[in-house]
Image (tube, rainbow, N blue to C red):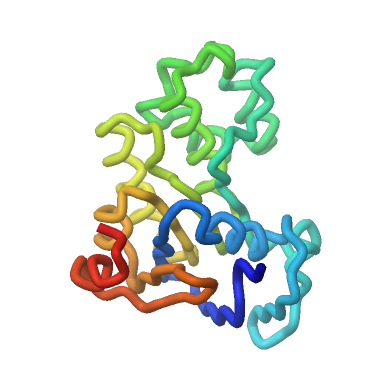
Amino acid sequence: MTLLDNINLSIEEGEIIGIMGRNGCGKSSLMNVIFGKFKANAIAHFDGKAIQLRDHLKHQLVTYLPQDPFMIDSGTVVDAVQMWYPDPEDQDKILYEPLIHKVHDVKVRALSMGERRFLEFLLVIHSARPFILLDEPFSMLAPLQIERVKEIITTVKPYKGIIMSDHYYENVLHMADSCFFLKDSILIAINDYEDLRANLYM
């Protein structure tokens, strides 16, 4: 079985692309291929030069917020931020975030699911890498956290290329410059809710 076939995707800094589709259609697999975690028969270019997607530690172009938790949970929130960002100025971007400030000294394992997810989002979105993959960025978040995530994405958008996927499709449709529906191993352009209904997503 071919999960992804003949997919051609192009993105620039200052652009948000939304990827939607049913569970198991390959959205996360596509992101894992772009990030370089999954091996695939794929060709990628940046500024006209070929790059190896699986060599992401070398090219330093893409960072990824996966669906599953990824932080080491033995330390505090401050410990986690310092591990990711040695530079105090970079740390401040996260530690002075109003929704995080009150949990500085809390163990990561003691955070609520929403607090942990929001913290992981902050770690990824403030990366120096120009391209960001967000897999279910609104998942498990409270309404206030969702609104803050949308604000932060809007703020960083001018100098980031962002690919996002989320079952909260209203947020994706609203924020993305272009959207695609992944179905039967191919990407179908989506312009509005009617296109989603036509693909039996709503």
Residue 93 is left or right of residue 72, and the answer is left
Q: Nearer the viewer, residue 187 or 96?
A: 187
For the image, the number of numbered tags is 0
In which quadrant of the rendered image does the N terminus lie? bottom right
Kindly give the residue lying farthest to the bottom in the view shown.
Answer: 48
x and y percent of residue 151 in the render?
Answer: 31, 47
Would residue 200 appear left or right of 94 to someone viewing this image?
left
Which x, y percent locates residue 191?
Answer: 26, 75
Image point (39%, 69%), residue name: 181
- Which residue sits furthest left? 194
Q: Quadrant of residue 62?
A: bottom right
Rendered location of residue 59, percent (x, y):
75, 66
**Would residue 96 be found to the left or right of residue 8 on screen?**
left
Q: Is residue 145 above or below residue 163?
A: above
Q: Residue at x 19, y 70 (%)?
A: 194
Tell me: residue 39, above or below residue 7.
above
Left or right: residue 148 compared with residue 110: left
Query: Which quadrant: the C terminus?
Result: bottom left
| Residue 182 position (above or below residue 114) | below
Q: Residue at x 41, y 27 (%)?
A: 114
The x, y position of residue 90, in whole percent, is 57, 40
Q: Residue furthest front?
A: 1
Residue drawn at 31 percent across, 74 percent down: 190
